[in-house]
Amino acid sequence: METVGFFFATAAYLAGWALYLVNFETQAPAFFNWGKKFVFAGFLAHLAVLAAAVWGGDLRGSGILSHWVAPFLILSTAVFMEWRYKTRIWMLFSLPVVLLFCVLAFVLKPEDGPAGLQVVRSGGYLAAHTGFILSGFAGMITAVLSAAMYLVQSYQLKSKRVGNFFLKLPALDTLDRIHFRSLALGVVLFSLGILSGLFWAKNLRELHQVFRDPKVVLSFLTCLAYWLVLGFRMSALSRGQKIAAGTVITFALLVATFVTTHDYAPPGGF
Amino acid sequence: MEILVLGLNHKTAPLEVREKLSFPSQKTEEILRALEEKRVFRERLLLSTCNRTEIYGVGSRPHEEVGEAKRLLSEFSHVNLTEFEDKLYVLRQPDSVSHLFSVASGLDSMVIGETEIIGQVKDAYQAAHKNQQTGKVLNTLFQRSFKVAKNLRTQTDIGVGRVSVASVAVDLAEKIFENLKNTKALVIGTGEMSNQVARAMISKGALASIVSSRHYDRAEKMARELGGSAVRFEDYEAEARRADMLITATLAPLVLIHKEQVRGWMRRRHGKPLFLIDIAVPRNIDPAVEKLDNVYLYNLDDLRGIAEKNRVYRESQLEECLGLVKRQTQYFMEWLGKEFGPSEA
C-alpha cells in the first residue's frame, strides 16, 4: 500500500513538473494550473502515506522516515517559498530535487536510514536528532535552490540574454537574501542534529561505531563545508556568484556521497 | 440600435492633425453635452488622448449621427472638416466592439501592450458616466473592456518587457537590486539620454548624484530638476565607490572608467553587485570590466537590443491576443442579442 501511494505521488510530481516545463515554454496558463493540480494530488498522497506510517508506528524502523520525509519537506518548503515570494518558478527548480529523492527512496534498501540512525531505537535524542537533521536539510535544500537560481539569473544578466528565466526569476538581491537566511538556518539546524546524534551515541557508548560509518564522516565534512561557505558570506569577504557556486557544489558532493555510500535494492524489490 | 466608433488615431492621422483634435477633459464634457443637445446617439463617450480621439456612440441613425458628430468635432477643434475627414474612421458593430477591446488592452497603441491607455479609457468612461451620457449598452461594453484588458495581461505576455532604453535599464536594475528605493545612482554626463535614464531610476526611488565633467552648473540644474545632488568631476571617484549604479553618458572620446578601478570598488563593496550603464558613444567604460564577478555592464546597443527584442516579443503575442479579443467580442454580441433582440445585435 505504501509503495503504491509513494509511486502515485512520484508519478504525480513527474507529471506536474512536465506540465510546469510546458507552461514555461508555451506560457499557456492551463499547463501551469494542471501542473499545480498534479503536484497537489501527489502532495496529498505523500502526506496520507506518511500520516498512515506515523499512525501505525512504522516510521522509525522501516526507513520510510529517512527516504520519504526528505522529499516531502523539500516540497513543503517550495510551496511556502512560491507563496511567500510570488514566483511561479520555484517549483520548476524544486521538483527535480524532489524527484531525485523520490527515486533514491525507491532504489535504496528500505532498511537504510540516514547515517547513524539505524542504531537508534529509542530515547529522547532520536526525536531531536531527526527533527533537527530534517529541518536543517530542508533549509539547506532551499539554500541550494536559491543559489542555483542566483547563478542562472546572474549568468543571464552577464550574457545579456534576458529570456523567460530572466523575467520569471526574482532579483539577485532577493535570491541572495533567501540563500543567506536559509543556509544559516539549515547549517545551524543540521549541526544541532549532528550534535544531538553524537550525544545519544555517547550514551550508548557507540560513538566509535558511528564514526566508522563513512556516511557519518561525509555528513560531517558536508556540514563543515557549509559552515565555511556561510562563514565567508557572514564575514562579508565575499557574496554573489562564488558563494552561490560554493553552495551548489557542496550539495552536489552531498548527493554524490549519499548515492555512493548506500546499498541498493535489487530490481523490482522496493 | 448600433454601437459605433468615429475617430482618428496615430495610424490614420499625423501628429499635427491629432494635436488639434486632442481635447482636454473639460472640453470633452462640453462636446458630450453638445452631442446630447443635438440628439446625436442615445449613449455617447469621448476618448481623447495624444494618440487618438474617438467618439463611442449607441445610435439608430448611423449616417446622420456620424455626420453630425463629425461637424461637432470640427466646430470644437476649430479645424475645417475637409482637413481631417479623410483621416477619420467609422466602425460599426461588431468591429466597434472589438476595436474598443483592442484599444483598452493596448493592442492598438503606438507602443503595443502599454498600460497607460487603460487608465485613459477608464477616465473617459467615468467622465461620461458622471455626466449621465452612458446607458446600459456602453456601461456594459466599457466594464467588459476593462475585464478583457485585465485578462489579456494575465493570460498572455503582451505586457512583458519594456520597450524604451530608460525603462529597460530600470527593469535590469530591478532584477539586480529588487527594489531601487534608496539605491545610489551616479550619473556622469548631463545629456538627454542620461537625463532620461536618471529620471526613470529616480522615479523608482533611487538616490541620484549627477556629475558633469566640464559644466558643473549643468549638473546642478539637472540635479535640481530631478531631485538629486550635483557632484564635481574631481569628487566622482569617492561617490562611485558608494554607488550601486553608475550611468555614463559623456561626450569624452576616451575611456573614463577602467577595469582596475572597478576591481578596487568591488573590493570595498565586498562583492555586492554593481550595475554599470554606458550609454556614451564612444564608450566611457572599459568593456573588460564586465569580466569582473558581480559587475553587470550594459552599453547603448545592449539596452536597445533588449528593447527591440521585447517589442518583437510583444508583437508575437498579438495573434493570441486578437483571438481572445475576437472571442470576447462574440460573447458581448451574444449578450447584446439577448438583451435587445437579434436584429439589434
Image (cartoon, coloured by chain):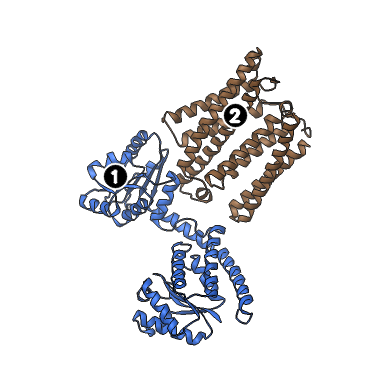
Chain colours: A brown, B blue
Report helix, strand or loop for mark 2: helix
**Contact flag, marks 1 and 2 (Cβ < 8 Å):** no
Q: Which residue is mark 1?
A: B256
Circle 1 residues within 10 Å: few <14, some 14–19, many ≥20: some
- Is A11 positioned to the left or the right of B241 in the image? right
Foreground pick, B199 / A107:
B199
| Chain of the residue displaying label 2 | A
- Is A261 positioned to the left or the right of A192 in the image? right
- Is B48 positioned to the left or the right of A246 in the image? left
Report helix, strand or loop for mark 1: loop
Q: Which residue is mark 2?
A: A254
Rendered location of residue B235, percent (x, y): 24, 41
Foreground pick, B42 / A259:
B42
Q: Is residue B111 visible?
A: no
| Chain of the residue displaying label 1 | B
- Is A115 positioned to the left or the right of B57 in the image? right
